[in-house]
Image (cartoon, rainbow, N blue to C red):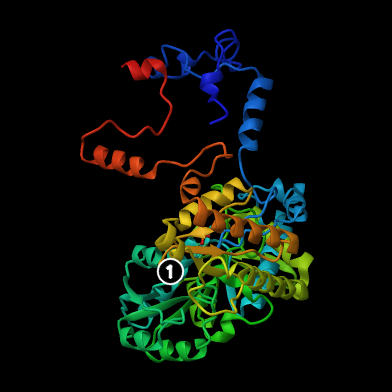
Amino acid sequence: MTEPLSFELSRPAVDPPRLPGAEEGGAALGDVLPGELLRSRPPGLPRLSEPELMRHYSRLASLNYSISENFYPLGSCTMKYNPVANEAAAALPGFAGLHPYQDEETVQGALELMWRLEQALCAVVGVDRVTLQPAAGAHGEWTALRMIRAYQHSKGEARTEVLVPDSAHGTNPASAALSGFQVVEVLSGPDGRISLADLESKLSPRTAALMLTNPNTLGLFEREILDIAELVHSTGAMLYYDGANLNAFMGICRPGDMGFDAVHMNLHKTFTTPHGGGGPGAGPVGVKSELVPFLPSPTVERTDGHLTLDHKHPQSIGRVRSFYGNFGMLVRAYTYILAMGGDGLSQASQDAVLSANYLRKLVEGDLEMPHDGPCMHEFVASANHLNHENGVRALDIAKALLDRQFYAPTVYFPLVVPEAIMVEPTETESKATLDSFAHAIKEIVAEARTNPQGLHEEPKNTPVGRLDEVAAARRINAYLQGQSEDPVLRWKSPSETAS
Ligand SMILES: *Cc1c(COP(=O)(O)O)cnc(C)c1O
């Protein structure tokens, strides 16, 4: 690291932080709390002046890589530019200063925004209603599966299995398992799309749903989606749409029209709300009419221009998130949709698909392309040939890109492609950026052929170099078997280390 911890920067000469009222004025703490709960010594907080602390955090922030600095081709994550207008709207005092316990009558504007966002999302994906509560895509999957289960129970059915293709994102089987379903894998065919024959063999009266991503995680459109929907529905099961790849066809076609019964959207992917870093996300779920009675409550209803929160849904699966979801994200997404308009959204998708195909063409001579193009908004290449010939893996290419000021693409996902490198350029990158990325790939692949050892040592220009993943795995294993001290996960003061 190039920046020490605040504890290491701490200087004894600086006065410790002091809270007013602890000693002077007010009640002494000893009058309020039992003596045995009081500290005998002050806490070991770092001693730094305000400017020192500010500089420490500013230096740390400068070690981050972000979309506001450079290209971020992380496949499946849709790392596109988040317009500043979204931030300005979310910061408006009328939105930012709201309290979730405020009376409905005083938050009519916020409710109207939620209602309008719901209408807009219904129109984009072709469903009857949308819940804005889920906090992420994975949470949306889980919410939808609970609605599907409640619906099937209401018809006296207890279906126990959820089908998930082998190319699916890991959250799909995880959500199904967490909802108490057995996960049944459906195989892909040689063209990278779901095998209808395999699907047919796995569908049964036990099937509750098929979870499908379209375009799938290989960036390929499931052309037989109408047949798939018919097959699934003919067994009484439901079709769930993992909407992480919605950026491929907004305003062009709609999952609801393809036969999907429930759909999640990742506002932090497709609708430009901030993404990653552990911050809040939003994963609204849209459903067709049969599932509407089971939506989380409350719903936002509008009658004669008056907005209310409706809690009267006897068949609802209940709340899935405190209050009304991550409201600030809803404001950002609604701002984006208004700024783009319907035509703007479909243009964004067309540009995203064009960017991906352009980049795919540029690098197809350097990386292996396991499936035929054209692709949708992302493509999956492979470093399998380099691994066989030169011992250079997808991981080496990802690390080498970091040294060339690019974020690494997604690697080793989807699992069906060995040494996978998944690239999603998005519509917000210029041709010049795509060209320079392709140039970097070309350089790295040339280096793989002439100096593979050099590549294993990259990155060299980042704050942290190549991590020793083998040593880390060994150490954790030894710890789990009780043969070593715990892995070092946090800083310990000299006095702690001594004891
Ligand atoms: C990102 C993603 C998810 C999960 O969404 P989160 O918002 O990260 O929980 C699910 N499926 C696919 C294909 C994804 O890319």
Q: Find residue 132 and report its image quarter.
A: bottom right
Could you tell me residue 76's position as x and y percent?
54, 64
**The disc labelled 1 sits on which kind of residue?**
Val
Q: Nearer the viewer, residue 467 or 159?
A: 467
405 shown above or below 385? above
Please, what secondary structure does the residue beneath circle 1 have? loop
On the question of residue 28 being in view, the answer is yes
Could you tell me residue 482's position as x and y percent?
21, 36
Local crowd at mark 1 within 10 Å, few (<14), some, or many (≥20)? many
Could you tell me residue 106's position as x and y percent?
71, 54
Q: Nearer the viewer, residue 237 or 93?
A: 237
Residue that appears at 52% across and 49% down: 399
Q: Nearer the viewer, residue 364 or 35?
A: 364
On the question of residue 73 being in view, the answer is no
Residue lying furthest front in this view? 450
Is residue 308 toward the left or the right of residue 370 in the image?
right
Please give the residue where the numbered disc 1 appears in the rendered image.
417
Q: Find residue 19 and report its image quarter.
A: top right
Is residue 386 toward the left or the right of residue 471 in the image?
right
